[in-house]
Image: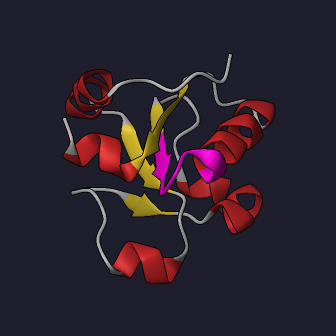
Amino acid sequence: MFEQIDCPEAQRLVESGAQLVDVRGPDEYAQGALPGAKNIPVQVMAQQAGKLEEHKPVVLYCATGARSTQAQMLLQQLGFAEVYNLGSIQKYYDC
């Protein structure tokens, strides 16, 4: 249920219109984020989930996959139907 997706799948989803969300902190985000990614840190995801479209797929990532897994569980509890976890930002760069 909370498995990570691979990079090609994440790229396909984003190219098809999925929302890309960096759940790391603002300092980490400022040091480098994936193109087009919104920054919604996992610590404030519950309060800021309204910045996302609930009926549009969401692809999450962080530094190691731990925070993106937390964010995935939270968004699913809030009613988001399509939430995908890329895991580590490095997976994208290694793709």
Residue 41, image quadrant: bottom right
Residue 67 screen position, x and y as percent: 64, 52
Q: Which residues are magenta?
A: 60-67
Residue located at (55% from left, 45% from top): 65
Percent across and percent down for residue 79 are 73, 30
Q: Is residue 46 left or right of residue 93?
A: right
Image quarter of the C terminus: top left
Horizontal side, residue 70 vs residue 89: left or right: right
Which image quadrant for residue 81? top right
Residue 11 drawn in magenta: no
Q: Residue at x 24, y 31 (%)?
A: 11
Near-viewer residue (55 or 90): 90
Q: Quadrant of the N terminus?
A: top right
Q: Residue furthest top?
A: 1
Task: Name the side, left or right, on which 2 lies relative to 95.
Answer: right
Q: Is residue 91 above or below residue 8?
A: below
Name the residue at 49% across, 43% down. 60
The spot of residue 38 in percent (x, y) is: 41, 60
Q: Position of residue 71 (x, y in %)?
A: 67, 46
Q: Count up the numbered dots.
A: 0
**3, 39: nearer the viewer:** 3
